[in-house]
Amino acid sequence: MKLSKTTHYSWIILVWMIAANIHAADPDLIARGAYLAKVADCESCHTAGPDRDLFAGGLPINSPFGIIYSTNITPDPITGIGQYSYDDFSRALRQGIAKNGKHLYPAMPYASFAATLDSDIEALYVYFMKGVKAVNYTPPQTKLPFPFNQRWTLMFWNAAFATQETYKPRADRDAQWNRGAYLVQGLGHCGACHTPRGLAFQEKTYSESSPNYLSGAMVDNWFSANLTGNKASGLGRWSKAEISEFLKTGHSGHEVAFGSMVTVIENSTQHLRKEDLDAIAHYLKSLPGQKNKSSYKPPVNQDQKVLPGVVSIGINKFELPGAGLYSGFCAKCHGDSGTGKAPKIPRLGGNSMVLSDNASSIIRLVLEGGKGPLTITGPKPKEMPSFAKKFSNREIADVLTFVRNSWGNSAAPVTPREVSLVRQKCCVKN
């Protein structure tokens, strides 16, 4: 007897429900898995928007090769992962291979997740199978152009580049450092955005063993921050407490989160336990600073004392290109002295992103505007307006060059061509 499609689906659901409830799940294990899903920030990629079903997929992810749509990772047995065994789940998470043998694109950070301990994979599996609502939804199909649509070729990519192994604690480091390293390198997959990519779009390294690790990279037309100890563009002048607080609220006396980091903080890091945030900060502060062309030297008075307010623009401010625009449009929020209004409005003097060798992010912020993250314990985010229609490429280049070379800042000038390229990729054209 041939079953109708509806009847066939109903039988699958029935069998799946029986199988899923053979063993009662430990509530503590589900809760632990839910926490680890926050650490891994599964929500940001596998939920298509605030009004869409959690983990049902369908979010378009921009890659250099085209748009990749995230998959449904709810326990639905037809459109999700409901029929995955633990081994299927572990293989997908750590090797990038789906139950049907299809290779997943590295937009799924399985190369980082490979460092995850078995006990944490088990907790995640129990959570996704028994703590997540099943959603019957088929996301749009990813259709990359040839040759990137040939997924079988990823077996060679994996062999060459997905070399991360299960995390092994370093005996020469303390427990807090090892916890921070485990979170950053594994489920936190910080390197996926903050580590430079090679010609095959692979992360150049997966740990602090290389100076490239977490030194900043271009992702979706944003330049993600340098997380090493560089005192200009990195975290060299940040304290551990400031890093921990930034991850919790998205705000600090140094910067306010922007771009894709906003969703990371809203969906992931603000929910982490303080001891884990402190461990991450402890680990990041151990990374030596990488060389940078920019520098920061806090202004001093005649007695060689650092001025807390930083020198203001001065009486001849309009003689410098960009200074007049800054005074008329930026100083109201960021101040004549570039000190901002912490924690809502970031300071510009000594700002790590302002001093980045790659100016793409600050160019994009001026063009598009932005808004910091809304968190449970942080301040109400302040919105920065867009100046794409108000200023020309030359004017934006001038004002950013002024900012990058005032109040102790010293960085390469921004060119109109750089602004034009970012405008063409991201923003409203002139």
Image: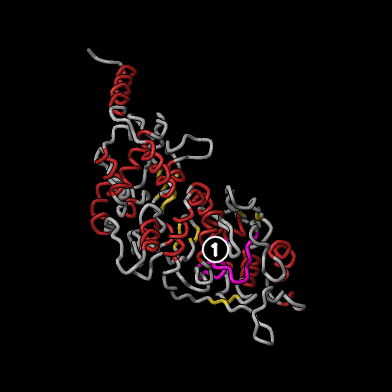
Residue at image position (62%, 71%) is 349
The foreground one among 3 and 367 is 3
Q: 177 above or below 7?
A: below
Q: Magenta segment range?
A: 345-363
Residue 95, image x, y percentages:
27, 49
Image quarter (top left, top right, bottom left or bottom right) of the C terminus: bottom right
Amino acid at circle 1: Glu
Residue assigned mark 1: 242
Q: Report the side of 402 relative to 257 (left or right).
A: right
Q: 49 above or below 66?
A: above
Q: Report the side of 189 relative to 322 (left or right).
A: left
Colouring chosen for the image of the structure? secondary structure
Question: Which class describes the residues within 10 Å of circle 1: few (<14), some (14-19), or many (20+)?
Answer: some
Q: Report the side of 163 relative to 138 (left or right).
A: left
Instruction: Work out whether residue 72 can be spotted.
Output: no
| Residue 99 in which image quadrant | top left
Residue 123, image x, y percentages:
34, 42
Residue at image position (29%, 32%) is 83
* Residue 164 among those drawn in magenta: no
Residue at image position (40%, 30%) is 134
Disc 1 element: helix
Q: 374 above or below 340?
A: above
Residue farthest bottom in this picture? 302
